[in-house]
Image: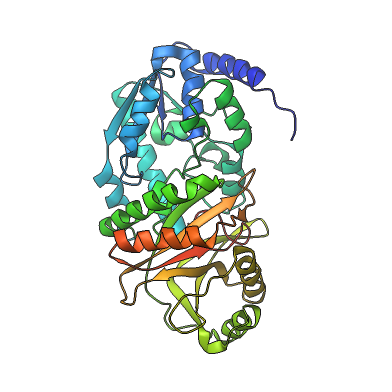
Amino acid sequence: MEDFNPAEFVQIQIEKIEEVVGGEKALIAVSGGVDSSTCAVLTHMAIGENLICVILDDAFMRMGEPEWVAGVLSKPPLNLPVRIERVQERFLNALRGLRDAEEKRKAFRKTFYETLSEIAKREKIRYLVQGTILADIIETKSGVKTQHNVLEQVGINTRELYGFKVVEPLVSLLKWQVREVARYLKIPPEISERQPFPGPGLSVRTVGEVRPDKLATLKKATKITENKLSKYNPSQYFAAIIDDEEKVPPLDVKEIIRQASEMLNLETGQVQVKVFADRATGVRGESRVYGDILALNCSKDGREILEVEVPKLVALQEAIINRKPQFTRVLYAVAERKVKKPYVIAIRAVETKDFLTAKVSPIPWSTLEETAETILEKCPKVSTVYYDVTPKPPATIEME
C-alpha cells in the first residue's frame, strides 16, 4: 500500500476550501456514505456554520435511511447542520418509463443538480461541495458509466447551468484513502466503514424501468441481504431486482447448456437457462458495454436446486462469457417459487480494494440459501433469487 498521510491531506484541504469559499456559504448533499460525509466534515472544519448539509430523500435510499443518516450526522461527535429535503415524486417522475441504464443515470443527474440548484438559489449559495473521488472520474471519462457527480471533468459548466461552482476536496483519492481520512477525523465507524452506495441509489439496482412496487420489493430484499451477509464483511453487498421477462426472440442457448452440464457434471436436461429482456452494464477493456443477463438454474433430480461452490460458479461464468461476450452478467439460482411472479432478485457480494476491479465473495451456500428463502418469504412478488457470480470485469459492480 502506498504511503498516504491523512493528517497532511486534511490540513491542505481545509486551507484550500477556506481559500475558495472564503466567508460565503456552501451547500453539500450528504447520503451517509463515507465520501460525502468525510467531505462534509472537512468543509465544516473549514467554514463552520456557513455549510448547509441536505439529504435528498429521492425515493432511492434504503428503508428508513434518510432519518438514520440525519441522526448520525447531526449528533455528536460530528454535529453537522443537516436537513432532509423530501423530493421523491420529482425523482420518480424523472425516471418514469426509462429502461436504458445510461438514460436513467443521466436523468437522475439532471434532476439531482436541478434540485440542488433550486436549494442553492433559495439560500443564496454559490458553492456546491461534492465527495467525488478518483474512481468516479476514471469510470465516467472512460465511458464505463456516468457517475452522477462528475461534471466539470466532462465539460459541464456548472456555473452556467446551475448557478454554482463545484468544490471537490476528495477528487485525488481512492476509496481506501477516503476511509483513512474519515478515521483520522474520528467519523463514527458506522459511516467510515460503511459499504459504498451509488449516488443514484436503488435506481441503478432496479434493472430496467423503475416502478413504485418494484422499488418497494427491492427495499425489502436489500434489508434482508444486508442483514444476512454483513457478518462476512464483503467490500460491497446488496440486492438488485429484475423483471422476470425473457428476451424476445430467445437466444440459442444450447451451447451454454452443454458447457454448464459438462463443468458441473450434469445431464443437459438438468440445466435450465434464461436470458432476461433487460440488460446490465459491463466493462470490456476500459470501455463500458451493455449486455445480456444470463441466469442458470441447475438441479440433480429435477426438483432441488443444485448446490455449487462459488469458485466453481465463477469459473463457469468465465468460460461462458469467454465464448459468449454478449453477456455481461451470469446469475445462479439459489431458491425459487414454483409459481412465476413479476420479479427476480440477484444477490451481489464482492471483494475489492479500489472498486476498479472486484472478485465475487465466496459466501457459504447455507447463507445464500437462508437469505434467498427469507427474501421469497418476505417478498411475495419474487419468483427466484439468484447469486451474481460475475467479477469486475466483465461486469460492473452495480447492475447499471
Residue 142's place in the image compared with 75, above or below, is below
Count every numbered label the image shows and give the total: 0
The scheme the figure's colours follow is rainbow
* Along the line of sight, the residue nearer the viewer: 212 or 362: 362
Q: Residue at x 53, y 71 (%)?
A: 307
* Along the line of sight, the residue nearer the viewer: 261 or 162: 261
Give x and y (percent) for residue 87. Answer: 27, 40
Residue 251's place in the image compared with 35, above or below, is below
Residue 333's place in the image compared with 140, above or below, is below
Give x and y (percent) for residue 293. Answer: 50, 69
Q: Residue at x 60, y 46 (%)?
A: 355
Q: Is residue 208 visible?
A: no
Q: Residue at x 66, y 77 (%)?
A: 323
Give x and y (percent) for residue 208. Answer: 39, 63
Q: Residue at x 51, y 27 (%)?
A: 38
Give x and y (percent) for residue 10. Answer: 60, 19
Quarter of the image for the N terminus: give it: top right
Q: Residue furthest right?
A: 2
Residue 380's place in the image compared with 257, above or below, is above
Q: Is residue 186 visible?
A: yes
Question: In the picture provided, is 16 more to the left or to the right than 22?
Answer: right
Question: In the picture provided, is 117 more to the left or to the right than 396?
Answer: left
Question: In the picture provided, is 11 more to the left or to the right than 382?
Answer: right
* Along the line of sight, the residue nearer the viewer: 123 or 358: 358
Snapshot quadrant of residue 206: bottom left
Snapshot quadrant of residue 343: bottom left
